[in-house]
Amino acid sequence: MLTKFETKSNRVKGLSFHPKRPWILASLHSGVIQLWDYRMGTLIDRFDEHDGPVRGVHFHKSQPLFVSGGDDYKIKIWNYKLRRCLFTLLGHLDYIRTVQFHNEYPWIVSASDDQTIRIWNWQSRTCISVLTGHNHYVMCASFHPKEDLVVSASLDQTVRVWDIGGLRKKTVAPGGEEVLRLPQMNADLFGGGDAVVKYVLEGHDRGVNWAGFHPTLPLIVSGADDRQVKLWRYNESKAWEVDTLRGHTNNVSCVMFHARQDLIISNSEDKSIRVWDMSKRTGVQTFRREHDRFWILSAHPEINLLAAGHDGGMIVFKLERERPAYSTHQGTLYYVKDRYLRTYDFATQRDNPLISIRRPGSAGANQGPKTLSYNPAENALLITSDVDGGSYELYMIPKESARGDTAPEAKRGLGVAAVFIARNRFAVLDRTTNTIQIRNLQNEITKKCPPPCATTDSIFYAGTGTLLCRSEDKVTLFDVQQRTTLAELSTPFVKYVVWNNDMTQVALLSKHAIIIADKKLQNAQTVHETIRVKSAAWDDNGVLVYTTLNHIKYCLPNGDNGIIRTLDVPIYISKVANNVVYALDREGKNRQIQVDVSEYMFKLALLQRKYDAVINMIKGSALCGQAIITYLQQKGFPEVALHFVKDERTRFNLAVQCGNIEVALQSAQELDDKDTWYRLGVEALRQGNHQIVEFSYQKTKSFERLSFLYLITGNLEKLRKMLKISEMRGDVMGRFHNAMYLGDVREQVKILEECGQLPLAYVAAATHGLHEDAERISQGLTDLPDINGDAKLFLPPTPILKEDNWPLLTVSKGFFETLAAKGRAEAAAGSKGGATTAAAAGGLDDGALDNAGWGDELDLDLGGGAGAAAGEEEDLGLGGDDEGGWEMEDLELPADVVAAAAAASAGTGAGPFVAPAPGVPASQRWLEKRSQVAADHIAAGSFQSAMSLLHRQLGIANFEPLRQYFMDSYAASYAVVPGVPGMPSVLTHLDRSYNADAPTQPPVAPTLLYSLPQLEEQLKAAYKLVTEGKFTDALKVFTRMLHIIPLMSVASRKEVDEV
């Protein structure tokens, strides 16, 4: 039995699989109905309206509905999309045992302890038939999948089959009411005619708990309190017992036919599930639980999945592995289907049976081929299976076999794993003696050696003479000849190993993770998946393409992964070539799937710094979308996204992020809104490009900011213009500020006098030595204010450097900047041959820069008439030609254009190139490792992802008690290093893998505050407090420990057990 999903809850009494989605409903003895996603392992919803146990539940085949029946005598119909109960059907007088929707008609059948079976129309919300005849509790009732029959089981020791053909004709047939009115009158007089008993099956000695139809054959199976499972056959006229299956040691709770195989599955209160071979009528397998009695079984209508409910929850499982055993060598796939070894040629797409192999074991016993290893040198095959607790078969493939009619004798042996390791040698892991046996092709042992680890439970091929040995929590690279361990790697439980063609890269596949490493198990990258990983193959470019249950995905050598496409059914990849994925499905059919690999080829080219290829892909493909842009931003390549992003706002954001002021200016002009100009000004100010800052402030009419900018850049001429503008606008504070910035005391005195602030005007004039003005103002004052003899003149410093952009680091240009600059230069030369450098760079003509940003004089909101304002405006000339235009930096332009620009700019000089974008912070590097340990996310400052992990792993919903521990963990992963005088302190990360001898060390994992030794010390302290009788203090310590445990990270299985 392969358990796929397990829950812990109250006793599960009812189960139902959704026909399409990976969902299962579980109705509990506590009255709650749970809706689970068994593929993701998450609880989607819970429905809690029944009063008392809910014993029956069932999904509708096509509508977003399910029905439930409980001990409150109510049948409820729910809409899971609306997440509520739509209506309730009342009529039963006792507990309701089972409910089921009809496959075609709007009917529900229900069985009850009131000894009746009722059929309801859920559309009209009425009971359309009551089936009476049982004289004890009716334990179950169900419709036949295709015919007009209902089967029911009762504690009166009988199974009854009811014919509901009359009911169908009466309620479903066109004009049925009129046609059947006469017979219906007789039926009402002498007992219901629309549902009649067809057969009564007697044979059980105790009450019958369950009965069910076979999906296609005229068979019924039943299970009873006499601990027996009985098989019945029926025809048009009669029904009879075929056989009895004995083996259960307590009441049989539920029994059913397997949908796809000739099997019967039953479960019982003896805490076991049994699988029976229908043709041989014998038990095949038994699965037991220690403490939980089983109550209910359910089968998925489409796929090979079963579910069983027990006292402590439920399990979703399948009886045997559906993955075909296969191996790929060069252009050929070798795989096992049914009882043949087959080959599939990828080039010609020809599929041939090669040889006939041993018949598989009993159905449902999980004894089919497990792995297949091919030896091309000797044309030999190794097939392993779980027969006899693990065995292998060695086949020598005849050279001339064509149709698979030959059946060469296999050499067999016992061992949990077997793989070829040389031309004429293979290795077998024998768990009974805990040795690795080296055998030749005659199946003779030539050598024995102990495995590298006592807990080794499987071996995989790792090149000639070497093996990968899997143990509990690690994989070991083992040299069989030297008997030495070459390397070790801590991993989750590895299920499959996939090597690339030249054996330089390996992918280790576990249930929910993929580890990529090189041949020495170094440079490991881990990719975590929430859904099961099924298979993988390397493509020719060194990218791993893998499948989960519902996706084909890719993984780059650095661990970045993404989705290529979705899948309807799981597949197992055998080869990836160009844009085609070759795969086997669960039926053993070869499939070819066309995929679009442009996304991962783009990322790979970026990773390998093949920038020419990156540019070609950008130009030639439809690569776009928020995901790619986000990826480029995360990886520090926002300038690449500028090449293909058309949306101006996105272009602006990217340009600001990568410090490309020129592109940001172009986008800002297109967008032309206040917020964009403001952000452009902030970025230009950060770079010290004050001419763009000026332009931005003019656009947003930020007069105060402009004045301050002119002050710090020493542009006194424009400050005087700002003084005049504020005077025209009637802005008193603006005038005074500009007068202060200019050090114009007469203007300050004049402003204060005009505002009626005569004492202040007098003090200002007297302090600054303007005696005439002071005397004139004093005549209007009765009390003269005192003048401070120690007062100092309030004058701004004289600027030394004027109007130059601030110096930047001179750095070499990257590939993309050079390319972008060339493109812009060519465009500028083509459109305006004689334009200045600045205008070409900004995409602006000279005229646009004169009085740039001020627009029509009326926009300035000036005081006075329009004519006066216009006159004043002409005198201001804020952006005259003598200003030298807007400086843009570092364009690769022809020499004559550069010379002309230099002459025009009159010594202002072209600024150096833009400084590079800042690197990726350590916290982001930590998160890129995709750790599933919440402590790592907390230390990196990603509280949101940490909380979602803790919620998923431990079910934590209230994080308030953990708040302080979160903050402490985050603070502990960083150190503050004092900077040089006048500079801020530097925040540096503390990495727990720090090595003082290493020359460089990228961030790997954050330092954690809480550790196991600390926890042990706290535990000792808590025990001491308990022995001293200080229970309140001890409780605080224990509570603190419980809060800390989820925020820890441990390295080994031993530490996990200790925690």
Image (spheres, rainbow, N blue to C red):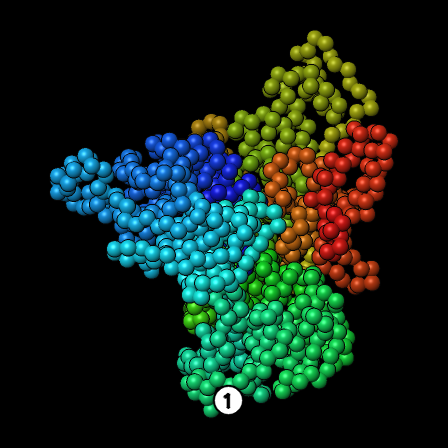
Position of residue 946 measured from the top left corner of the image (x, y, whole percent) = 64, 45
**Residue at the image position 69 percent from the left and 47 percent from the top:** 935
Q: Residue furthest bottom?
A: 400
Count of numbered badges drawn on the protein: 1
Label 1 environment density (alpha carbons within 10 Å; few <14, some 14–19, many ≥20): some
**Residue at the image position 75 percent from the left and 23 percent from the top:** 767
Identify residue for label 1. Answer: 398
Q: Residue furthest top?
A: 782
Image height check: is 989 above or below 767? Answer: below
Position of residue 316 measured from the top left corner of the image (x, y, whole percent) = 51, 53
Decide which of 117, 474 is in the foreground and name it.
117
**Residue at the image position 69 percent from the left and 78 percent from the top:** 437
Kind of residue sitting beneath label 1: Pro
Decide if residue 989 is in sight here: no
Decide which of 306, 639 is in the foreground and name it.
306
In which quarter of the view is residue 350 placed?
A: bottom left
Image height check: is 5 above or below 196? Answer: below
**Residue at the image position 35 percent from the left and 31 percent from the top:** 90
Position of residue 708 measured from the top left corner of the image (x, y, whole percent) = 64, 37
